[in-house]
Image: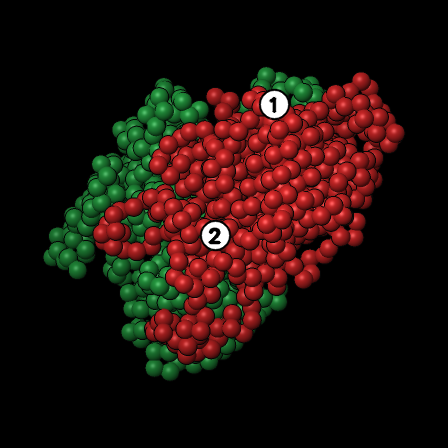
Chain colours: A green, B red
């Protein structure tokens, strides 16, 4: 498992800065593409915490009580129950009761930091420690397209979001189901999704979790790409294993988790929580249940293969107690995220939460306030893997092109924020203050001239011109500018090179597998 | 000065919860007004910090160097220079050079916590310590009105923003120049502004700073309202004293500061910084200059009257190095705000920064992302007084009705966030988890029924309904809903009662003073 036990040293900050690729070449020739991709974030700023030692201990003790007294269900999976029995748990029916400390003991083999490898080594990411990795929206069946239509997503949309994630400078990951390609049969679309991630991007990606055989297909395709041994001894897939909260693991997710853990691929163990429905209406109660669920699920991966990477995942939202609708970007999910990140650090597991979550139907100020509240929390909580970091709209029902562009610009800001305060001699700027003196300005001074290129985050979407200039330019809202930029990016897109032999082998594998099964649409 | 030296105890959280007033009565009769006003925030969450001891000491040492070696200018004010000379500073021309430690020594008399009294004692606010007080936008000459026009502001707009601030549940302060009533002569509008704050609200407010005699008029009007002795022995006005950065105090601001400090009224000593123009292009350099400027200006208030309240103010924004336009909500100003808050705490002064700052011309996603980034930073920095907390648009050139409504909703979220995690038995919700168990839901359980009213922040502006429901209701953007709500509030507004004798005396004073001077329009 040594390949998974990397430390914070020598990653991120240094690696990849020299990496430019085609985006930089395009920029150099004056193209309309984005600036070059940044390496994943190594945070130089601290984390924000909302619980003290007493609060953390209380929640941990309560989680232990839940696990022992109430138990967690592992449904319709005799193997899972047998494994738990053998590990010393008290299994009654499908309900597993955990002796205090059992799961924490099992989790000692799980790595706190590991590398997820990309086919382009410069795009590999560290998961855990001070690393933060942004990945796009996951799951929406609909898109809001560039012509303003809200419609079912297709494989073409899927490819587009892969391309946009490949081009977005502060998107470090290609994600998973960036939208559901509903024009392809349910039992076959995972082939096209995994293939699109491989073909149209060179960033790391996620595997299919909707059935154990689809997980196996994802692993098989990675073996064609990376080689058998490499896959078995390294991690090349991150996989979203949702808990069926409260306190249930279902057969599908257990099946997928087993496949991935067995092959040393990472499970993102994520209670899917809308507080008030799937957990208590309180922050502390929700945190307690999340902790119990993650402890049980993450420990289960270690029963399958000790040392298999696993993340402490949290998807935190609330529901409106009037309508039952999910709500995002409100204070309570932020408190849950901060608290869950603390619990994850104490467990020594990498942490996933957050993203650009919102309930709005359009990329308006509601969408932005909700997304910003969640994104700021995500960064300051010290989140390691951020799903839904761009493109999420309408409670996750819609992948929005315009929202994706606006969000990815914000990710650039968070990446700059994470660098913290530069206290070097140049950062202190005492010479500049001496040069300028009282009553003058810094615009032309030597220090400003030497540093202005890198001094401030430069948004390509925000309009900070005068009102008059803005009016002359058409009085555009940010989503209008995002629409224009998105079209330009897709126009400028160039695929990263892929070994033709691998490409052929992948296509042959897909064709053969697809042939072997009839289309299924449910 | 004892009246100014209150502690955190017995404020906020407890006081004012029982306060309801006309808003509650309206709500009880099913009116369309807002929920009742909340007391100011007493933060139960910690602060976020970006500098360690080494960084703080470095910046403090550099600020000392600036103050001693470069000096700060106090322009066109012989009295100020004489006071500095007498205090032991080295005055050369208008430039004051400060021996190391002089300003910090002088600041020992400044209170770290004080009360700003409102005419309704339930609306008085604590400034400093764990208190956070939200005040509306300050300064715009333009408004974006409810008919979508961008036009010069009038006294009617001014009154409207006072009314809206009075009604907004999480707006704790009436502010100052909520917009410039440009339909009134420049030398007379301060009367109408101060009178509007007194007449149409009972929350605390700010005095005029555009000329020493206007400051004196503000104090005189407060003496009519509160009584002579009360004003001299307490603080009833907060006053925005901007530094003419870099490192210049001008005659106007010095004149106003002297009037207010002499009468024991609070100065919010605020370097007005667009980094890259008025300060170096780096965060550490900007912090160094801010610290030097605040040390000099705040210490000056103590030369005028030891014990006069003074705040460490920071207005942090950057400029676009392409166009020179100010930019907001970017990472660098956030780092400046976090750092400045730390420096203020080490000085023992209350801290002001932040607000709902943005550069956008309309309340779109750009405006919201920029505002949210700034507001989240403001709260987590531990800011005590937050100017521009609602209504700011277009770099502060415009007071926007719709933006005000959207922002004030977010202030409610921040107020809820500041309560932190409830770890009581009810908060832990172990009984709820026991009752519900695996695979069920919490919607109907006893704990949910008992707690759902107060569990989650409830936005009156966010739409979380289904896409279909939202479409049936007109497919409205949040600014459309804000427009409707704003009209309803202004319709439902009821003035807080004001003693008719005081009202008459104020009007008589204003009439007499106005008569004594010709209109001036510059």
A335 relative to B403, above or below: below
Residue B494: image tag:
2
Using residue A433 as the reference point, say whether residue A123 is left or right of it: left
Query: Which quadrant of the view contains residue B192?
Result: top right
Identity of the residue drawn at 34% across and 30% down: A476
A55 vs A332, nearest the viewer: A332
Q: Is residue A213 visible to us here?
A: yes
Identity of the residue drawn at 42% across and 54% down: B33
For the residue carrying disc 2, how many other residues have a C-alpha within 10 Å: few (<14), some (14-19), or many (20+)?
A: some
A92 relative to B451, above or below: below
Using residue A492 as the reference point, say whether residue B388 is left or right of it: right
Say which chain tag 1 marks: B
A442 relative to B486, above or below: above
Foreground mark, 1 or 2, reads: 1
A247 vs B481, nearest the viewer: B481
Identity of the residue drawn at 55% across and 26% down: B185
B401 vs A517, nearest the viewer: B401
A394 relative to A489, above or below: below
B158 vs A274, nearest the viewer: B158
1 or 2: tag closer to the N-terminus: 2
Give SS at disc 2: loop
Residue B315, percent from left and from top: 60, 35
Say which chain tag 2 marks: B
- Residue marked by disc 1: B518
Give SS at disc 1: loop
């Amino acid at each position: 498992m040594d390949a998974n036990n990397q430390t914070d040293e020598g990653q991120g900050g240094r690696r990849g800065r020299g990496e430019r690729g085609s985006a930089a070449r395009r920029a150099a020739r004056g193209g309309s593409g984005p600036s070059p991709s940044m390496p994943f974030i190594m945070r130089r700023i601290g984390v924000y915490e909302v619980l003290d030692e007493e609060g953390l201990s209380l929640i941990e003790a309560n989680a232990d009580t839940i696990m022992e007294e109430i138990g967690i269900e592992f449904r319709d999976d005799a193997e899972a129950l047998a494994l738990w029995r053998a590990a010393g748990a008290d299994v009654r029916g499908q309900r597993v009761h955990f002796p205090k400390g059992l799961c924490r003991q099992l989790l000692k083999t799980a790595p706190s930091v590991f590398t997820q490898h990309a086919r382009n080594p410069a795009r590999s990411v560290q998961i855990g420690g001070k690393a933060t990795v942004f990945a796009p929206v996951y799951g929406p069946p609909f898109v809001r397209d560039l012509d303003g239509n809200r419609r079912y997503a297709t494989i073409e949309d899927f490819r587009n979001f892969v391309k946009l994630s490949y081009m977005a400078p502060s998107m470090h990951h290609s994600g998973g189901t960036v939208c559901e390609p509903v024009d392809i049969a349910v039992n076959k679309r995972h082939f096209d999704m995994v293939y699109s991630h491989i073909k149209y991007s060179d960033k790391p990606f996620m595997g299919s979790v909707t059935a154990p055989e689809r997980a196996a297909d994802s692993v098989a395709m990675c073996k064609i790409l990376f080689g058998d041994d490499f896959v078995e001894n390294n991690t090349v897939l991150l996989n979203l294993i949702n808990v069926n909260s409260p306190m249930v693991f279902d057969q599908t997710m257990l099946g997928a988790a087993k496949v991935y853990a067995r092959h040393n691929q990472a499970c993102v163990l994520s209670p899917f929580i809308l507080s008030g429905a799937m957990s208590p209406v309180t922050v502390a109660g929700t945190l307690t249940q999340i902790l119990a669920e993650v402890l049980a699920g993450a420990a289960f991966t270690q029963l399958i293969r000790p040392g298999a990477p696993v993340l402490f995942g949290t998807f935190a939202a609330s529901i409106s107690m009037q309508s039952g609708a999910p709500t995002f970007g409100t204070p309570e999910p932020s408190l849950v995220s901060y608290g869950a990140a603390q619990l994850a650090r104490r467990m020594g597991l990498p942490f996933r939460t957050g993203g650009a979550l919102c309930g709005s139907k359009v990329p308006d100020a509601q969408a932005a306030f909700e997304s910003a509240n969640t994104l700021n929390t995500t960064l300051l909580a010290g989140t390691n893997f951020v799903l839904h970091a761009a493109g999420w709209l309408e409670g996750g029902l819609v992948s929005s092109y315009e929202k994706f562009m606006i969000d990815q610009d914000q990710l650039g800001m968070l990446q700059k924020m994470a660098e913290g305060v530069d206290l070097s001699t140049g950062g202190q700027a005492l010479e500049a203050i001496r040069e300028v003196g009282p009553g003058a300005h810094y615009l032309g001074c030597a220090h400003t001239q030497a540093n202005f290129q890198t001094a401030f985050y430069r948004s390509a979407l925000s309009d900070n011109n005068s009102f008059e200039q803005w009016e002359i330019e058409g009085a555009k809202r940010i989503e209008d500018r995002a629409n224009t930029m998105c079209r330009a990016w897709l126009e400028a897109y160039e695929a990263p090179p892929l070994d033709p032999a691998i490409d052929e082998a992948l296509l042959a594998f897909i064709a053969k597998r697809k042939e072997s099964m009839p289309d299924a649409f449910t």
